[in-house]
Image (cartoon, grey):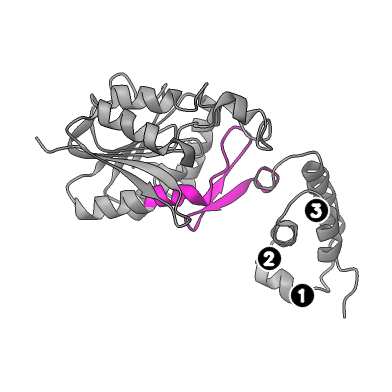
Amino acid sequence: MYPNTILDKIRQRLKPLSETYSLDAQVLLAQILDKPRSWVLAHPEAQLSDIQEEKLTTALKQLESNVPLPYVLGHWEFYGLAFTVSPAVLIPRPETELLIEDALGWLQEHPKARKGADVGTGSGCIAVTLAKLLPNLKLTATDISPEALEIARINAKKHAVDQQIKFIQANLLPVSGGSFDIICANLPYIPTATLHTLDVFEREPTLALDGGSDGLNLIRALLKGGGDYLNPGGLMLLEIDSSHGSVARTLAQEAFPKSNVKLIHDLSGRERLIRIQRAAA
């Protein structure tokens, strides 16, 4: 009924750029029109104002210049919450929601454990989500990048949890940050040589992706020093690459020999998390 709609035109522009070009077109047009995506689909006859046309033209040029859609939009959804993003931070991904679910389940089973750390916080999606869901949880969120910490602070304020989270610029855990009941981390875990072959290289911050020669440099360092920060009976959750499962588990068992170390699988059966339950004192 409505041939050559705006949505159709956007789809054609995005088709060479993305496997999810149809969804991307809907999300982009919804933002330009400041309407829900359902409204866009229900109103194919919608027209753009001159200002909206300019915004769409700019956005399409950015996308065709290899800028990821979340950076063009300036935000992305994670665990049902909207997070501000920029090229200074990794785009939140659905696989990290598994870490949230495991952490949340453990915290609900341990109501007195209310002091946590999010190491390498990036956009703050882990710390902010946990704080939003558990108003009595206090967190320390660290990142080596001051630009990333600024984005994380913005997200904490956006979701009204900035009083629950202390942001610290640090390489992994702060020197005098105390101890924690739960430590969560989604650290860079892609081997350097592999990263240079991936589409994500130079599209998202290398600092948030490059895990060193074997992809485990930062995970190894956190495991080595984490014993000084994790309380007896506490939990450490580390997101890993699915190819690192057995090696990462061995590293964790060596670092925490008296702890219960498990690999947690995602819905596709991939090894996605290292779960370290430290023995109680």
Looking at numbered disc 1 in the image, what kind of residue is underneath it? Answer: His
Circle 2 crowding by C-alpha within 10 Å: few under 14, some 14–19, many from 20 = few
Q: Give the side of residue 233 with respect to residue 210, left or right.
A: left
Q: Give the side of residue 40 with respect to residue 175, left or right.
A: right
Counting residues from the N terminus, which is met first, the one under dot 3 or under dot 2?
3
Callout 3 secondary element:
helix
Nearer the observer, disc 3 or disc 1?
3
Nearer the observer, disc 3 or disc 2?
3
**Circle 3 residue:** 14
Whether residue 32 is visible here, answered yes or no, is no
Residue 271 is a magenta residue: no
**Circle 2 residue:** 35
**Circle 1 residue:** 43
95 or 164, which lies in front?
A: 95
Extreme residue in the right direction: 4
Cα distance between the residues tagged 3 and 1? 20 Å
Extreme residue in the bottom direction: 1
Residue drawn 28% across and 20% down? 176
Whether residue 214 is visible here, answered yes or no, is yes
Quadrant holding the C terminus = top left
> Which segment did they paint magenta?
71-100
50 or 183, which lies in front?
A: 183
Image quarter for residue 4? bottom right
Callout 1 secondary element:
loop
